[in-house]
Amino acid sequence: MKNYKTPRGTYDILPSEISDWQSVEGLIRDICQVYNYLEIRTPIFEDLEVYKRENDTSDMVNKEMYSFSVNNKDYLALRPEGTAGVIRSYVEHKMYASADLPAKLYYYGPMFRYERPQKGRQRQFYQFGVENIGVKSPLMDAETIALGYTIVKALGLSKVKVLINTLGDKESRDNYRNALKEYFKDDIGNLCQDCQNRYETNPLRILDCKIDQDQPIMKNVPAMQRYLTKESQAYFKEVLHSLDVLNIPYEIDDKLVRGLDYYSHTVFEVVSLAEESGSQATIFGGGRYDGLVEYFGGPSQSGVGFAMGIERLLILANAEKTLENNPDSVDIYVIGLGNVSTIPLEIATELRAAGYKTEFNVEPRSLKAQFKSVARFNAKIAIIIGEDEIAKKEVNIKNLTNKEQITCKFEDMLANIDIIYNEMESEHETHEH
Ligand code: HAM
């Protein structure tokens, strides 16, 4: 028999893990809400050209994309990232014409890259991302970084570092590209094959090559800062000043260039220093892009954004134990003894309608076995009902925190549970304060 498994680089998120995902998702949505970002949902596949743009040299587009054709006519690709699709949508729906720019959009969902899988790197992975489009201001660069940083901090991650750099405007980059070509000209033969290609197509990418990073030639690479135009310098200074004002610590990393081609001005990555992140330490990364809106047929507007890898976030949150982990817990467990027929189901249904997360015993079992379930579900209250109680139209309610038990009529059950539950909650709160 064939052994069916998930394809390499993909995985199932099991029910036992889902509460971690949902709490991270909830936190992200809450923080986006206070920052006034609205969610956008674009298709998981797009026309191939949305990603494979003219002269794009990135690995993501050239080596890692899941592209395919259907009946030899529709050329499509699974999205390797969210930015291109969001900008395509921004232009298609003429959001650029809004009186209230910037458009502040966020997205959440699976992305696909044909990469070599390892811890924190999958072929299908989840990204949360934001795009702030239509206003070019250092304040928006800072707001975007602050939003991502707030999420990471709200999750309780302590060992994080913000790395930031600027690629300047087109003129600065052209100057720098020429300077790098000049600098590497005699040594290019000693660099890896990828860097030899990058030398021709995009020499900036040589700076973040993992293979060549320890080569002697990498030590004295001219710094980008020297090639920035006055305007680009001033822009970057403003971004840094805004981060200072917001008390966000950062480190300037003049080798940070990012793996995608569309950036100009600010680029940043927030990395984890925790051991658990292994070699995949970037939690989120992004930057400003000047040409994308125009590329997709819109006006000459700029945007800034980032994307965050949720698997990486969860690896770190679990390592620092910052997520509450009790997916199976219930408020109330209904124990049935003897021939109780449909009564536990009816009681559970009534309690669920009142908002209590409730489970009940299905097939007849001993009281001991049922109490094991009570413990496993970490229930706060148990309802105990047997044939005698049914005859008298009564139930037993046991407060599992202080072990007190009361007996009451069916019709008073809910009112009594409300009282017990509220007492528990207020006691819990006084303990916390
Ligand atoms: P990116 O740096 O390619 O940027 O990806 C952003 C984040 O997605 C990474 O920092 C990482 O956390 C996560 N990630 C990327 N690839 C994988 C993978 N194979 N497995 C697990 N996690 C992964 C972008 O995607 C840009 N669209 C960001 C952006 C938005 N720039 C401007 N706006």
Image (spheres, rainbow, N blue to C red):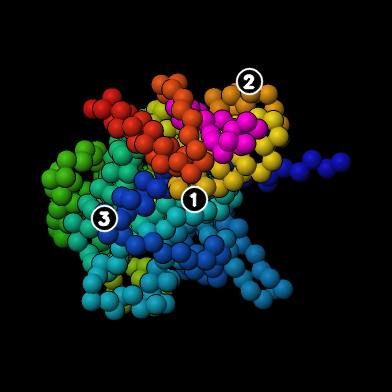
Return the disc, 3 or 2, that comes first in the chain's sequence: 3
Distance, label 3 to label 2, CA atoms, is 51 Å
Q: Which residue is mark 3?
A: 35
* Secondary structure category for the residue under label 3: loop
Q: For the magenta stretch, what is the residue range? A: 377-400
Q: Is residue 75 magenta?
A: no
Q: In terms of secondary structure, where does tag 2 sit?
A: helix
Q: Quadrant of the N terminus?
A: top right
Kindly indicate the quadrant of the structure image that contains residue 84: bottom left
Q: Which amino acid type is marked by label 1?
A: Ala
Residue in the picture at 45% in, 59% down:
82
Query: Measured from the top left, where is residue 374 in percent x and y?
Result: 55, 28
Residue 141 quadrant: bottom left
Q: How many other residues sit within 10 Å of disc 2, few (<14), some (14-19) or many (≥20)? A: few
Front: mark 1 or 3: 1
The one of 310 and 116 positioned closer to us in this rendering: 310
In this rendering, the answer to whether 103 lies above or below 173 is below
What residue is at 53 percent from the left and 34 percent from the top?
Answer: 395
Q: Which badge, 1 or 3, comes first in the chain's sequence? A: 3
Q: Nearer the viewer, residue 275 or 32?
A: 32
Q: Residues within 10 Å of mark 1 (few under 14, many from 20)?
A: few
What label does residue 189 carry, if any?
Answer: none
Compared across the picture, whether 433 is left or right of 55 comes to left
* Of marks 3 and 2, the one in the foreground: 2
Please check the rendered image and state whether residue 393 is part of the magenta-colored stretch, yes or no: yes
Cβ–Cβ below 8 Å for labels 1 and 2? no
- At mark 1, the secondary structure is helix
Q: What is the x, y in percent for residue 197?
A: 49, 52
* Labels in figure, total: 3
What residue did someone put label 1 on?
353
Residue to which mark 2 is pinned: 368
* Left or right of residue 156, residue 10 in this image: right
